């Protein structure tokens, strides 16, 4: 099970006691094992913090799984993963999403289909079918590769890149109260492979900075300050979705 042992909520054997009899428990551990039978492998996992300590061990968590080898999804520059998000305390449905990774860094762009998850299961009278998940995920991943190829052919002007940066800032700080950094900081490339004007490269640069944080110089304090990485799974998913949608629409 790889590192699931480090995520106790993914190993829960029942729902939180506060759930009613109508609540259908989806065992993350069992789902992962069934996907492993189809050739998926666990890459890494994590869980959210809890405000109510009574929910500890049942909270929202996520597991990233590598696709089976030989499915034609891997390339030297990109990697596809299946992202499973679940909880056992009523805070989230079981969700399956496609994560697209750029091989030079650890950011994972979430590719939503028609503004929805790849698959979503409410915790009421649903049946999880790993074969159906496998087939649908493969088809969706191949379609996403085509979308990425189109983005790589679309070159953005400096003004279009800056507009993208301002959009991302609005997602991270919707109240408009963001730290005093130059918006062009969002376009900073951490790696040479990202430093290109095509839409795919710009999307990756912006996503990397808005989610993983960065340092900037504060002229009033006359010293460097840190924008911390996002740790909230719901906000990560929401910003990822909206960045992807913005790029596709462009």
Image (cartoon, grey):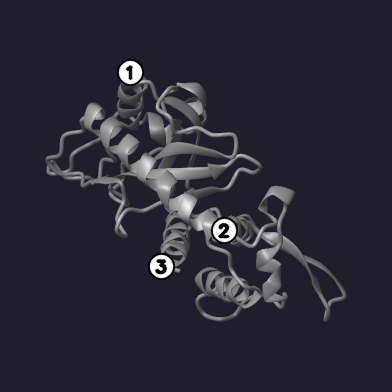
Q: Secondary structure at mark 3?
A: helix
Q: What residue do we see at 67% from left, 65% from top?
A: 187
**On the image, numbered disc 2 is attached to which residue?**
207
Is residue 54 in sight in this rendering?
A: no
Numbered circle sitting on residue 73 = none
Q: Where on the picture, by quarter, is residue 245?
A: bottom left
Q: What residue do we see at 49% from left, 55% from top?
A: 232
Looking at the image, residue 108 sits to the left or right of residue 134; the answer is right
The answer to whether the residues at label 3 and label 1 have Cβ atoms under 8 Å apart is no
Q: Looking at the image, tell me whether mark 2 or mark 1 is earlier in sequence order.
A: 1
Callout in the foreground (2, 3)? 3
Residue in front for this viewpoint, 7 or 134:
134
Q: Secondary structure at mark 2?
A: helix
Other residues around mark 3 within 10 Å, as few (<14) / some (14–19) / many (≥20):
few
The answer to whether the residues at label 2 and label 3 have Cβ atoms under 8 Å apart is no
Residue 70 x/y as whole percent: 43, 22
Q: Where on the picture, by quarter, is residue 29?
A: top left
Task: Report the Cα–Cα distance between label 2 and label 1.
Answer: 33 Å
Looking at the image, residue 48 sits to the left or right of residue 115; the answer is right
User: Where 156 falls versus 180 (above or below)?
Assistant: above
Looking at the image, residue 122 sits to the left or right of residue 188; the answer is left
**On the image, numbered disc 1 is attached to which residue?**
37
Residue 81 x/y as whole percent: 45, 37
**On the image, numbered disc 3 is attached to which residue?**
249
Residue in front for this viewpoint, 107 or 84:
107
Residue 133 x/y as whole percent: 27, 34
Q: Secondary structure at mark 1?
A: helix
Q: What residue do we see at 66% from left, 59% from top?
A: 213
Other residues around mark 2 within 10 Å, as few (<14) / some (14–19) / many (≥20):
many
The image quadrant where one finds the C terminus is bottom left
Q: Where on the picture, by quarter, is residue 157?
A: bottom right
Callout in the foreground (3, 1)? 3
């Amino acid at each position: 099970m790889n590192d699931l042992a480090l995520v106790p909520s993914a190993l829960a054997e029942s729902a939180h006691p506060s759930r009613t009899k109508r609540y259908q428990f989806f065992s993350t551990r069992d789902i992962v094992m069934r996907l492993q039978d189809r050739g998926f492998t666990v890459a890494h996992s994590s869980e959210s913090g809890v405000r109510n300590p009574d929910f500890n061990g049942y909270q929202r968590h996520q597991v990233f799984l590598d696709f089976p080898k030989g499915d034609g999804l891997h390339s030297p520059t990109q990697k596809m993963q299946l992202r499973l998000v679940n909880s056992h305390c009523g805070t989230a449905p079981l969700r399956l999403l496609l994560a697209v990774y750029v091989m030079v860094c650890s950011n994972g762009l979430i590719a939503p289909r028609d503004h929805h998850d790849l698959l979503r299961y409410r915790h009421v009278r649903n049946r999880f079918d790993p074969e159906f998940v496998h087939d649908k995920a493969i088809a969706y991943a191949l379609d996403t590769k085509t979308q990425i190829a189109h983005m790589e052919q679309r070159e953005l002007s400096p003004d279009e890149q800056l507009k993208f940066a301002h959009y991302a800032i609005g997602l991270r700080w919707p109240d408009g109260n963001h730290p005093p950094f130059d918006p062009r900081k969002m376009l900073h490339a951490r790696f040479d492979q990202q430093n290109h004007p095509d839409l795919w490269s710009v999307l990756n640069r912006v996503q990397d900075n808005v989610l993983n944080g960065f340092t900037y110089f504060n002229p009033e304090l006359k010293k460097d300050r840190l924008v911390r990485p996002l740790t909230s799974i719901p906000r990560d998913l929401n910003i990822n979705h909206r960045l992807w949608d913005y790029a596709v629409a462009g």
